[in-house]
Image: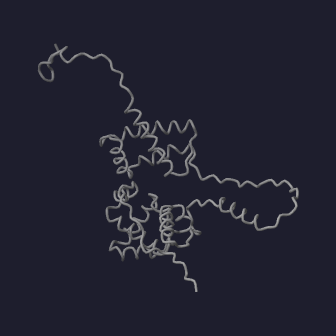
Amino acid sequence: MARIAKSGLEYFPFDIDFFQDIRIRKLIKRQGGKAVTVYALLLCLIYKNGYFMQWDDELPFIGSEMSGFEEAYVLEVIKTCLTLGLFDKNMYDTEQVLTSKGIQVRYCNIQRLNKRMSRIDKYSLLDMPQQKTTANKGKKTAKSVNPKPPVSPQPVVPVQPVPTKPPVVASGNNAEMLAEFFADNHQENLNMLCKNFGLGPDGIPHLRSLAQAVVAEWELSRTEHRDYNDWSRHLISSMRIKHRDTANKPINNQPTHAPADYTFDGGFGGADV
């Protein structure tokens, strides 16, 4: 009797750049270092049974019991992981499932190394091209069938699938997104962004001016985005380019007076000679 294919994993890789991931850094910034323990626990529960985990109202209790943290804290960490993209929020909202594209990629790689025949059919976030396989099957079938006299086929008009556009953020919502980006509850993220840009603690006004310039260009070009996460990622990338261009802009050297052209005697209220 053939053995039933095992879907769960006995181990999963832990990248050495784990703590360099901006999402992990934000998770630690928002929920503290112990949030990594909760996230690692969720990964273990997911990989133990495959590549996803169905949401259950008892999950915060299970996480609390296994980690020693409060249920409310475990639930907040899960919500933050969804917000940051560590778990796919759209899949959670529609299917009540915790998974991500990265989880599924690692799962497939491990199964391939273990020489296991395992496929991701349910809740797949991967793009699996099938055209090549279909073409190969067609060639094998053509060889196995006896040749017949050619018959003039009737022209067939291929039915092209209608592409479905993802939901977009209309250009008119840029003002709302900009207000959300600079909201008070994002102060920590803005301070971190200032550091990444090489700005001081008072650099938020400069960030705002960069963001307003980028949004003004989007309004003219009617640039669209899928959601707020896509909007904010594009904004930060465009702001970084503008900031770099501004920093690299050549300075117009104008002749200035040498310091020795005048002297100052006295303090405040003294006379310039």
Q: Residue at x 44, y 63 (%)?
A: 79
Above or below residue 113? Residue 182 is above
Q: Nearer the viewer, residue 255 or 10?
A: 10
Residue at 30% across, 41% down: 200
Provide residue 151's location: percent of width, then percent of height: 88, 58
Residue drawn at x 47%, y 63% is 87
Looking at the rendered image, the quarter that the C terminus falls into is: top left
Q: In the image, 229: left or right of 167?
A: left
Q: Position of residue 49 (x, y in %)?
A: 48, 75
Q: Quadrant of residue 58?
A: bottom left
Model colouring = one colour
Residue 126 position in % (x across, y down): 56, 61
Question: Viewer-proximal residue, 3 or 17?
Answer: 3
Residue 28's spot in the image, x, y percent?
A: 34, 59
Compared to residue 109, the image places residue 23 above or below, namely above
Image quadrant containing the N terminus: bottom right
Q: Residue furthest bottom?
A: 1
Q: In the displayed structure, would residue 161 be above or below residue 268?
A: below
Looking at the rendering, which quadrant does residue 42 occupy?
A: bottom left
Badge count:
0
**Identity of the residue drawn at 50% across and 43% down:** 175
- Compared across the picture, whether 126 is left or right of 187 comes to right
